[in-house]
Image (tube, rainbow, N blue to C red):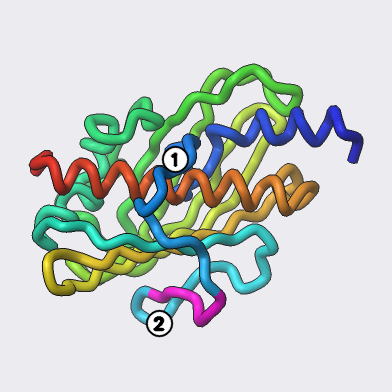
Amino acid sequence: MSASRSTGLRTALLTVPLALGLLGAAAAPAGAATAHRPGPSLTCRGVGVDPEARVRHRTEAVIHAPLRTVWRLQADVERWPAWQTPVLSAERLDGGPLHPGSAFHWTTPLPPNPASTDPVLEITSTVRQLRPGSCVRWTGPAVAAGLRIDGVHVWTFTEVPGGVLVRTEETHTGPQVDANVPAATDVLRQGLEGWLRDLKAAAETGDR
């Protein structure tokens, strides 16, 4: 891949981290999250991320807020735009509390780039596994004209002294990300750490 195409791909992906994980393209401040560490993949009800994906990242942080607060923020999908700037819109495609089979459609900006002329990335996620207050796993594509990324995203929530240990892991597959795995992995890292940073800020500052 040429240097110019690599730069274009990186630019194209800067707002793409999918939830896939996908949000918060700005790098997280020091201490906001712990970087990926080798080890068993996270699971929800025994199921994890895509074992064949080459683009993957895992991170974690302790959030100093009650578990009910952290879980409510994460599970109330339609309120994501209130505390995640990169989320332009979020709509549940079903009703009631989040549950296996729940689906939601959400969007994030896609700046001008060689991969797509669309201004917005469209994401449809489906919850596959869930244990309220403990874990959630969803899958789904992020698409724009000429661009598709398939993501698998796992979150786990564990009460610890003083708060909640939140862990998250995500994998991406697709022609654009597989064409430059190091760049795509770095973008995914930024997205996951940004999402975790925003969740921590919202929970700890009383957005409950």
Which quarter of the rendering shows the C terminus? top left
Question: Residue 59 placed where, x, y %?
Answer: 44, 61
Q: Is residue 27 magenta?
A: no
Q: Nearer the viewer, residue 91 or 109?
A: 109
Which amino acid type corresponds to the residue marked 2 in the rendered image?
Gly
Q: Nearer the viewer, residue 7 or 173?
A: 7
Quarter of the image where one finds residue 147: top right
Residue 71: assigned label: none
Quarter of the image where one finds residue 172: bottom right
Question: Residue lying farthest front?
Answer: 30
Q: Residue at x 27, y 47 (%)?
A: 199
Q: Judge left or right: residue 69 versus residue 1.
A: left
Query: Residue beneath label 1, please?
Result: 23
Quarter of the image where one finds residue 160: bottom left
Query: Which stretch is magenta?
Result: 38-43
Query: Residue beneath label 2, please?
Result: 46
Q: Nearer the viewer, residue 77 or 86?
A: 86
Identify the main secondary structure in magenta: loop
